[in-house]
Image (cartoon, rainbow, N blue to C red):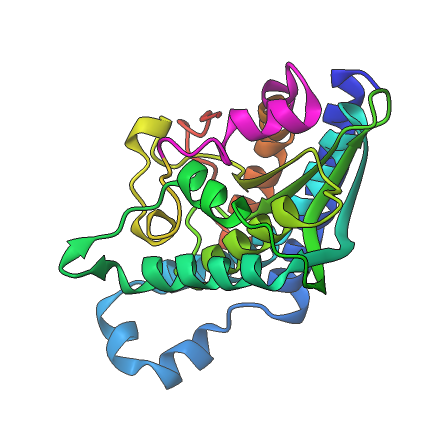
Amino acid sequence: MTNNQMKIEIQLVIKELMDKVLKRVLETDPFLKDKHRAEKPLYAALVPDEIFKGSHFERRFVTPFGNIWETLAVVAANQGLGYGQKQYEIIGNMSEERLRRITEILNRLEHGKIDGKKIKPDWDAELAYVLDDKSEITIPVKVICDVYTRNTVTGEAYSFEVKAPLPNSDQTKVSKEKLFKLYCMEPRQITDAYYALPYNPYGTRENYSWSFPARWFDMKSDKVVLIGDEFWEKIGGSGTYQAFIDALNEIGSEYKQRIYTEYLGIEIPEDNQWTL
């Protein structure tokens, strides 16, 4: 599959989502002006209906789009590494002491301080501490990977915890625990595992400043964290991120036009030429 073919596959996934969203807001769950005015008379008296109509669309768009990243990652993996699968189950064994140390680290990060000193995440140091265990008593553990990929040429396998760009703290804590387990299983079944965000709303990695994941990872330095193009290039190879951007830009104008005319019922603004 070439980057152009991957772009087409990405567009098919996006189109399916957008068509479902438009069907919902136009047919099965439209914005009802009279209902809005009856339920929120104060808001309706002060704010134009169109503002809340836009919010109605946003809520029905954001939630399903947040669940599509894993599907897009599999498309990229099938192009780049050769194989990808969502919700892949990995079963192995771990020592009880390693599990205890993982819990110890997560508890420290959750409380944030020890003896008045602030605890900062440091993946390399934490993983080294967990792995520094020689005990032989093991118990079975299971991890369900958001996305599992395999290089069909080299046999290398990778796991990705794929989260929306502004994840909450609980999600990130669960992801970090899963990454620890994957790196600590015997025998180890992945080459590497990552905490991955599909794009960066802050522009550069150095500027990423969403506080919730920073409680669990050093978002600027931990090598286990991939953000934006780092993630797409890792999973799909060189040019993957640009193929993703091109795919969105090519079909974006079509859906913007439909939203303006069919949903909002207004003329398309002259400056509606924005692209990623």
Q: In this rendering, would 171 be left or right of 238? A: left
Quarter of the figure with residue 8: top right
Q: Where is residue 44 in the image (x, y as percent from the top left)?
A: 30, 73
Q: In this rendering, would 202 be left or right of 81? A: left
Picture layout, residue 154 above or below residue 104: above
Q: Out of 201 and 150, give the one closest to the viewer.
A: 150
Picture layout, residue 242 above or below residue 45: above
Picture layout, residue 198 above or below residue 8: below
Q: Is residue 228 magenta?
A: yes
Magenta-drawn segment: 220-243
Q: Position of residue 200 (x, y in %)?
A: 42, 34
Decide if residue 262 is in sight here. Answer: no
Q: Where is residue 98 in the image (x, y as percent from the top left)?
A: 56, 56
Give the residue at x 54% y 54%.
175
In the orientation shown, which residue stands out farthest toward the left?
Answer: 116
Decide if residue 48 is in sight here. Answer: yes
Give the residue at x 39% y 45%.
217
Q: Position of residue 174 (x, y in %)?
A: 52, 60
